[in-house]
Image: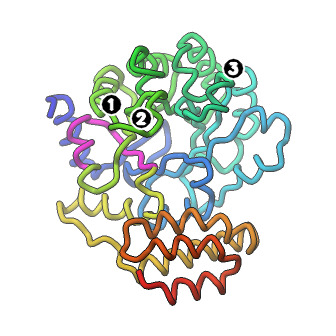
Amino acid sequence: MAKGAEDSFEKRKDTNMNLQIGNVKLENNLILAPMAGVTDQPFRLLCREQGCGLLYTEMVSAKAILYNNKNTKELLRVESKERPIAVQLFGSDPEIVSEMAAKIEDGPFDLIDFNMGCPVPKVVNNGEGSALMKNPQLVEKILSALTKKVKKPVTVKFRKGFDEHQINAVEIGKIAEQCGIAAVAVHGRTREQFYSGKADWQILRQVKEAIRIPVIGNGDIFTPKDAKQMLEETGCDGLMIGRGARGNPWIFGRIQHYLDTGKLLPEPDKEHICQMILRHAQMQVQLKGENMGIKEMRKHIAWYTAGLPHSAAVRRQCNQVETMEELEKLLENSGF
């Protein structure tokens, strides 16, 4: 472990892993990554119950807020028991992004986050998300506009770079700090990688060593041991868990227990998984109606049951399920 990283890790152990972003104090430094189509309100609430210290909404288009898009209002719906929570905006026009951030600032959000990490083609081809990594001057304009317009702490999430020829996370981190950004989250992959290959944790360490504001590490945290290793190798202040939380809201409590005690809690058994699936489904149905709620649960069920013995049949059959009653029967009769 690098000396700076080691000192940072020891300091955090002494402070019980607390993290403060601007004036927002978190109970711990475990953070749910924003994931489109995943981190809706029911899933966020389950992660909060399992010990997540900070939630993020799904990413929201600044232009969609400007045009009063109906679906966007749903994405911005937040309950007080989710707090602290960050709302994540994306866009590329400094004026629109900052004006829309100011417009929603009085909502029940604790932080305003700006997305510079999304690798999806329709976002990137529009010059948004991780495409902004190619234009540091525009990044500076957007982040400066945000911090001038918004009183709440502003954070930004970005990647290692756009591709292996444009690795500039350290530069972007310095720009963010100079613009008054309260914290940065860094994913250790380029846009070109999407989610393939291995996340480069050394770039997280380099960003951490280059700036003074909190640095949140993201990429390849799938187990409590991964979490501890990232803290030790990078010295980062927080841990952001994305794909590792899909179908696994327990990961936050298991990581916290391991960091506190050095002991691994057992992974949830079939009974606990089934209970969580049903609870998750009930919350989806309550929020979105039975038809839409059950349809949206199908992908979650695939994640909850991945790797379990005899679970392939459950995943096939869940695509035919349309009601809570049918889901309950499927899980009751499942052989996994």
User: Left or right: where does residue 24 sit relative to residue 221?
Assistant: right
Q: Residue at x 31, y 32 (%)?
A: 200
- Few, some or many residues within 10 Å of mark 3 (<14, 14–19, 20+): some
Mark 2 lies on a secondary structure that is strand
Identify the residue at the far top of this view. Answer: 137
Q: Is residue 215 above or below residue 80?
A: above
Locate residue 212, reporting x and y percent: 35, 25
* Residue position for label 1: 204
Query: Label for residue 187?
Result: 2
Which mark lies nearer to you, 3 or 2?
2
Viewport quadrant of the N terminus: top left
Query: What colour scheme does the image use?
Result: rainbow
Locate residue 143, reporting x and y percent: 59, 22
Q: Of 122 and 60, which appears nearest the observer?
A: 122
- The three-letter amino acid code for the residue at tag 3 is Pro
Mark 1 lies on a secondary structure that is helix
Q: Of 324 and 266, which appears nearest the observer?
A: 324
Q: Residue at x 70, y 49 (%)?
A: 76
Specify whether residue 234 is painted magenta: yes
Span colored in magenta: 228-242
Locate residue 32, reporting x and y percent: 47, 51
* Residue position for label 3: 94
